[in-house]
Amino acid sequence: MKAPAPPRPKRPAHLPHGRWLGDFPRLSAVEKEFVAKCAGGEACILGDGKRPTAATTANRIRAGLIRFLLLGGDDAHPVHENGVKLKGAWITDTLTVENVKAAVGLYLVKCWFAESISARDATCTGLSLRGSQLPGLSADRVVVTGSVFLDGDFTATGEVRLLGAQIGCDLTCTGGTFGNADKDGKPLGDALSADGMKVTGGVFLDGDFTATGEVRLRGAQIGVDLYCDGGTFRSKLQGVALNADGMTVTGGLFMRAAKLFGPVSLTTANIGSLVDDRNCWPDGSLLLNGFRYGRIADGPTDASTRIAWLKKQYPPHLGDEFKPQPWEQLIKVLREMGHPGEAAEVAIAKQRALRKAGKIGQRRPDPRYSGWCLGLDKVWVAGANLLARGWHRIYGWLAGFGYRPAGILMWMVIVAALSGWYFSTAADAGIMAPSSAEVFAHKQIHADLHARGNDAASCGIQREVPPTRYWPACTALPSEYTTFNPWLYSLDMILPLVDLQQDTHWSPSATYTDAKQVAHTLPGGVIARVIMWFEILFGWFASLMFVAIAGRLVEKD
């Protein structure tokens, strides 16, 4: 006679559905093994442990059973504190663990999910989906006291959401594939959304990490580093590849060899250090307004490369909507890092960019005026703006907007050299003449001698005497009189507080007197006088500017 079947255990009345193993009738052999392994604190590895490509009786696990075990099982089937560990499974149905407060971790490695995972507001000690494939993950406000692993050969064909998530250690997505695209591979929406996420450790979007769709880290707080080295970020149509507005990273942002196909927004982001290379940033699509970083830890610090980086900004931010903060931030960092020369070059480039953007001389008429007052104000403002633009350009040429004060001295040397050359030519052409009354007294004596036939004693200027008797070479000058030197004469003109006795004793002659005592203009003399006046004015202007810049009396910008 056949023995009667043991009575079926009575369902505990206090347990909600899904919290008692009896709610899962007809457990398969692999599900029974899974329950047993969790009780013993071991990982349940199905088949060869690789991610399955098809469902079989040897790898199929119900999602509800995973939730049952994550909640701790029941009195007859407790879960070890090592957590729920499963590898190589084909998971059916939707894994819903919303609001679950688990005392253990969930480690589903190299599994294939038929449906998305919903884990909003859940709590657990660790989460690993390493090497798994799933249609998407919704884990807004999830709290994981340990690390989250979405790495290895992890593949998501829909959005992964970690909005407001709190992760006690690291978020590792190295080598993961995050895609929210259509069948042709075109991005449809966000690939990884982690706005407001708080990570105590680091975030790894590096290696062979690939995102097809926007990666959002807006307002995220990262306690150590954000690694994007070698990662690929591809934006959706008219979207952003990497959106990190307002993000805070205590450590560094690593962007070496990153491949960015689409805009990158770091508006108001704040990081400890920047680690990048020359080619990682996309052209014409950087949003850097308000982006702050303490230093450039490992990357180019030469001015030319960094200026080229800033010129990759979103075009309107270099034009009508010019943003000065990214330039000022770079200047500040380079200066604090001990690169004052490079900082100065960036500051000069900023001024040129401002002029190119049309931001110099932008005064507008006062709207309080009307009638003829408004018309007069418009004329005044137009003139003031024109003067401001002209002064800005001259200031840049002469002194590099105050960052190259030595440039003023260079221009003074150039002007003095060119003027000295002309004065030398003028002297040889008989244009330079004494300007002291003492000499003309002597000249009268020489004229008397000339009248008595001593022609060699008479000196003069062009067209008055032969070239051998031009004043600069005149041997009849008093011995105590300063000999003309064109180079010292030029220096005497351009140096306002220096007296080399040249300008007091010599000056260009603008006219000559013919035999009929009629005065005629000497064009070369007129030019020499204009050059002389220009040198005097330029010398005063340049000297005062140099002193003002050196004494910090003029703002560099």
Image (cartoon, rainbow, N blue to C red):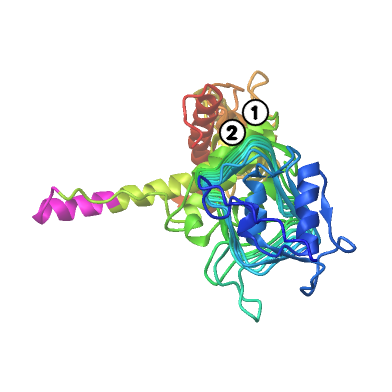
Numbered disc 1: secondary structure: helix
In percent of the image, x 51 and y 37: which residue is there? Answer: 538
User: Magenta includes 422?
Assistant: no
Drawn side of residue 461 relative to residue 171, left or right = left
Task: Tell me where the magenta segment starts and ends, as one range.
Answer: 368-381
Query: How many residues crowd around disc 2 within 10 Å: few (fewer than 14), some, or many (20 or more)?
Result: some
Drawn side of residue 1 relative to residue 492, left or right = right
In the rendered image, is residue 85 in sight? Answer: yes
Query: Which part of the image, by quadrant, shows the N terminus?
Result: bottom right
In percent of the image, x 47 and y 29: which residue is there? Answer: 554
- Answer with the quarter of the image where residue 505 lies: top right
Drawn side of residue 445 relative to residue 21, left or right = left
Numbered disc 2: secondary structure: helix
- Identify whether 261 is placed above or below 491: below
Query: How many residues crowd around disc 1 within 10 Å: few (fewer than 14), some, or many (20 or more)?
Result: few
Say whether marks 2 and 1 touch (CB < 8 Å): yes
Depth check: 91 or 335 in front?
91
- Answer with the quarter of the image where residue 161 lies: bottom right
Q: Which mark is residue 162?
A: none
* Three-letter amino acid code at the position of disc 2: Lys
Q: Which mark is residue 336?
A: 1
In percent of the image, x 51 and y 34: which residue is there? Answer: 556
Residue 82's x, y, as percent? 76, 39
Q: Residue furthest top?
A: 480
Determine which residue is flagged by label 2.
332
In percent of the image, x 58 and y 61: which residue is there? Answer: 263
Residue 302's x, y, as percent? 73, 43
Depth check: 243 or 502 in front?
243
* Three-letter amino acid code at the position of disc 1: Glu
Magenta span main SS: helix
Residue 4's x, y, as percent? 73, 61
